[in-house]
Image: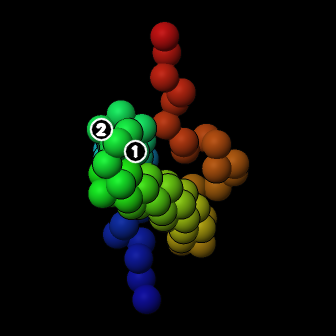
Amino acid sequence: MDISYLQGYKENILIIINFLFIPAVMAIALLTFLWGVYNYFILGAESEDKRSEGRQFVLWGVIGFAVIASVWGLVYIVGATFGFFSGNAINFAPPPPKI
């Protein structure tokens, strides 16, 4: 199987995945988690239904973070296998936010 034609697209693929897709999905998981915390502690302070709804959002937010980390690792493994990049995974991680 000849995948040499993909070599020209490797930088664009990595940029789209690492700098657009992953941060967007992580933001959604973070918002889901925070919405669950808000529902559990603030909106659901007196209502058991809101508290259970908040618990579900927190659970799905945590599951989302775990899935994102797994997919990010899988992308690195597949990329290293096909020779898209070599070296340390930290070289292809998005830069940390600046304050």
Q: Nearer the viewer, residue 63 or 11?
A: 63
Classify residue 24 as left or right of residue 94. left
Marks 1,2: beta carbons within 8 A: yes
Three-letter amino acid code at the position of disc 2: Leu
Q: Is residue 74 above or below residue 96?
A: below
Task: Give the residue pinned by disc 2.
Answer: 43
Using a 10 Å C-alpha cutoff, classify the residue at mark 2 as few (fewer than 14 neighbours), some (14 to 19) or many (20 or more).
some
Q: Dot 1: what SS? A: helix
Q: Nearer the viewer, residue 88 or 9?
A: 88
Q: Dot 2: what SS? A: helix
Q: Is residue 46 above or below residue 61?
A: above
State how the image is colored: rainbow
Three-letter amino acid code at the position of disc 1: Tyr
Classify residue 99 as left or right of residue 39. right
Residue depicted at x 64% and y 55% = 86
Residue depicted at x 40% and y 45% = 40
Residue depicted at x 30% and y 57% = 49
Q: Which residue is farthest right?
A: 88
Task: Give the residue pinned by disc 1.
Answer: 40
